[in-house]
Image (spheres, helix red, strand yellow):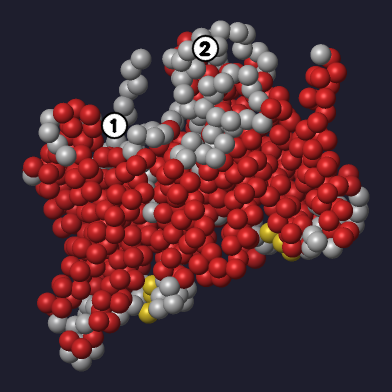
Amino acid sequence: MKGKKWIKAVYPAAVVALIYLLVTALRGVGIMNGYYNQVLMFAGINIMMTASLNLVNGFTGQFCIGHAGFMSLGAYGAAVVTSMLFKNTDSVFVFLLGLVAGGFAAMIAGMLIGLPSLKLKGDYLAIVTLAFGEIVRALLRLVKPIGGARGMIGIPGYANLGWILFFMALTLFLLRNLIHSPFGRAFIAIRDNEVAADAMGINTTKYKMTSFCIAAFIAGVAGGLYAHVISFIQPDNFSFTKSADFLVYLYAGGSGSLTGSVVGATLLTILPEFLRFLADWRLAVYAVILVLVMLYRSEGLCGGLELPFMRIRRQELYEEPLFGKKTKGKGEQA
Amino acid sequence: MTYFFQYLIYGLQLGSVYALLALGYTMVYGIVGMINFAHGDFLMIGALGTYFIAQAFESFQVGSAYPMLIIGLIILIAMVGTGAIASGVEAIAYRPLRNKPRMIALITAVGVSMFLENFPRALPFIGPNPRSFPTLFQAKNLDLFGATITTTQLVMIVLAVVTMVVLYLVVNRTKIGSQMRAVSMDKDAASLMGININKVISITFFIGGALAAVSGICYASAYPQVDVYMGSWLGNMSFVSAVLGGIGDIRGAMLGGFILGIAQIFATAINSTFGYAVGFIILIVILLVKPAGIMGRLVVEKV
């Protein structure tokens, strides 16, 4: 039994390592070229963004539709550290420091945006997060030292597929454990019924704030990675369109399911690239596919499903009240 | 002071575009309870459609201007066409999702918006390039407190106000209006009272689309350039104005549109980037003070 548990703990990491080895091997043979590699890197970053959005939207039941704002703060924060503060130091620690700085920059913003969430609900909160994303974009355009509207160029390309896979795996691991924990249970309780959660003694304010902060931190780190992949960022990269992309990944994959975030982000990052042979019709076809997915599987591709190593024992997690349904009767904790 | 009035006029002009578009947002939200992100694209369809309809009517041109009757006809066709597209979108994409969680409809709306932008873009005779919009109204300059107001601006502002009054009367005084209000209060009860919900929602989308077309014509007459992406940021801004005024409330949408338009013009006069952000800043401030918008009423959640 103990051995089985050990395997269960290790094999997600093994899967990620295998993906990395496979890709490296394919590159060595020449089947993978730099383009595919870059698509995979973007997929990894999008998975991080979608998973963190999932924490807020899917697990805590708040509506954040300005997630690209956090990403932009992270990207700028990290880029400032690596290409301005430590311009001449070329080391891994600078890169990591940059990512952490980006994460904290986004987290502080997350705290600020979490404040109105104490007062606002539903669509009004959504519109405030949208406004937040756009304000961040406008302000970044105003700050001249970081390039204003022209953006920052020449950010060192520290991030490679290995780093991105590492951070992606770390994100998923942390989020899964978080959702398992009493903290995560509190998030889910708030999503299912905020009033009831409040009545059960859950400090909803604190947990909603925490959820926003953690998600913002992860988004900031993802933004930092993004900046170090494309080495050129400008405020307009992080417009509402970008936020809408993450929402699409999240809900097409299935909200409230980490597997869904992975599947949604991966598939929908690769799909537009795969459709390139359609030339001008590419985005129109992509939109049609998206609408069809939402119409015929509106809970998302993996809605309510989790892969074994990401599973939370409670079966009826997705969008349905936990207490209204017949429970399985056993203990909830996995 | 002259500048003040001049900016005010520009603000009212931009505000009328926002207001007309926000009316559609607010009506759809009030009745279906969903944020229709594709609404800005109805504006684009209206403007782009008008461009092609005007081309079709080119033979009726006298000199470089269209006769009044033809202009009326062009606008009418554009309104009906856009309205029909809006109801069509509702029937195909939104109706099957009516009882699903709201975010699902929102994501579908994002998809629909992408489609409405990229499908015309891919069509060979439309394409991604911006086109210059034909001059529908022959502009004459009038003098007002030392500021210049063109007849186009005057027509736009008056049109927006008249539309709002008509819409307000339709919603509050007619049979279909009372059906709309009934559906917005309680769909199931309205259905039990013999109201055809599908029809009412279709009509709502139709009116929203038609108003978006008018708004598109207004916008394109003021800034005579149309392309397939023009709707997205206008849509966002007018959504903000709808929320600002209190979403679901017709007077609120109008008020929010004008406030946002005027604020944006004055802020742009100070700094162009700030002009874009100021709408959002106003929004956050107002929502913090009055969480349901200026005209909105907060619904108390009963347990």
Q: Secondary structure at mark 1?
A: loop
Q: Chain of mark 2?
A: A
Q: Is residue A164 left or right of residue B58?
A: right
| Mark 1 or 2, closer to the camera | 2
Quadrant in which the C terminus of chain A is drawn: top right
Residue bearing the label numbered 2: A327
Asked whether residue A203 appears in the rendered view, the answer is yes
Tell which subunit mark 1 falls on.
B
Q: How many marks?
A: 2
Task: Confirm whether residue A227 shows in the render.
Answer: no
Whole-percent x and y of residue A270? 64, 54
User: Which quadrant is the N terminus of chain A positioned in?
Assistant: top right
Q: Are marks 1 and 2 in contact (CB under 8 Å)?
A: no
Q: Quadrant of residue B156?
A: bottom left
Tell me which amino acid carries mark 1.
Arg
Q: Residue furthest left?
A: B174
Q: Secondary structure at mark 2?
A: loop
Q: Foreground residue, A32 or B297?
A: A32
Residue nearer the viewer, A68 or B60: B60
The residue sitting at 22% across, 77% down in the picture is B137
Image position of A246 with respect to A28: above or below: above
Q: Where does label 1 land, which residue?
A: B297
Residue B202: image location, x then y, percent:
23, 48
Question: Image quadrant of residue B220?
Answer: bottom left
Q: Look at 33% across and 65% down and name the residue there.
A: B45
Which residue is drawn at the image coordinates 32% and 43% (left, top)? B95
Q: Is residue B137 left or right of residue A145?
A: left
For image coordinates 64% across by 35% down, the residue present is A259
Q: How many residues crowd around disc 1 within 10 Å: few (fewer than 14), some, or many (20 or more)?
A: some
**Which residue is farthest bottom?**
B63
Compared to B243, does B125 lie above or below? Answer: below
- On screen, residue B101 versus residue A111, left or right, reads left
